[in-house]
Amino acid sequence: MFGKKKQPSIKSLIAQGSSIEGNLKFTDGLRIDGEVMGDVRAAEGGASILVISESATVKGQIYADHVIINGRVMGPVHASELLELQPKANIEGDVSYKALEMHQGALIAGQLRPMSQDAEDKPVLKLAANNG
């Protein structure tokens, strides 16, 4: 409905108090509430969603289609579709994305890089009018 793709369900959880050392590959959806010391990568070929909660810390690279961050990330973030930065997001690294939603309070210590798009595929810029 309204042209939105159905989001994959979150099937895996790294709970608060858990710590993983090493690279992690997932399919569909993953929620991190604990700590990951290594790269977090979605498997290729399907839609993916990664949620990094307020209590989570990731030290490594992140690759997924849809990434929602409200915790701490030390490393580059690559969101091939949408990157949502919640108010308590704290990223130390470069960020690349196709679309970005950033809430007040989110911090990024790095460069923001929109993924290159073809001239025909550029998003339309719409300015909101202030009717006040």
Image (tube, rainbow, N blue to C red):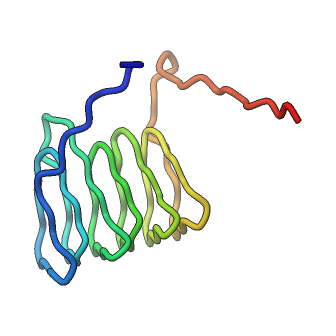
- Number of callouts: 0
89 in relation to 121, above or below:
below
State the image quarter where residue 58 is shown.
bottom left
State the image quarter where residue 81 is shown.
top left
The residue depicted at 11 percent of the width and 58 percent of the height is 12
The residue depicted at 12 percent of the width and 79 percent of the height is 21
7 in relation to 2, above or below:
below
The residue depicted at 41 percent of the width and 19 percent of the height is 2
Task: From the top left corner, tell me how far across and down residue 82 is, in percent.
Answer: 40, 42
74 in relation to 106, above or below:
below
Assign the C terminus to one quadrant of the image: top right
Looking at the picture, tell me which residue is in the foreground, 98 or 129: 129
Task: From the top left corner, tell me how far across and down residue 64 is, in percent.
Answer: 26, 48
107 in relation to 31, above or below:
below
The residue depicted at 14 percent of the width and 40 percent of the height is 44
Pick out the residue farthest to the right.
132
Q: Could you tell whether 97 is left or right of 45 in the image?
A: right
Looking at the picture, tell me which residue is in the foreground, 20 or 53: 53
State the image quarter where residue 28 is shown.
top left
Pick out the residue farthest to the top.
120
Task: From the top left corner, tell me how far across and down residue 18 is, in percent.
Answer: 15, 80
Looking at the picture, tell me which residue is in the foreground, 4 or 123: 4
Task: From the top left corner, tell me how far across and down residue 1 is, in percent.
Answer: 36, 19
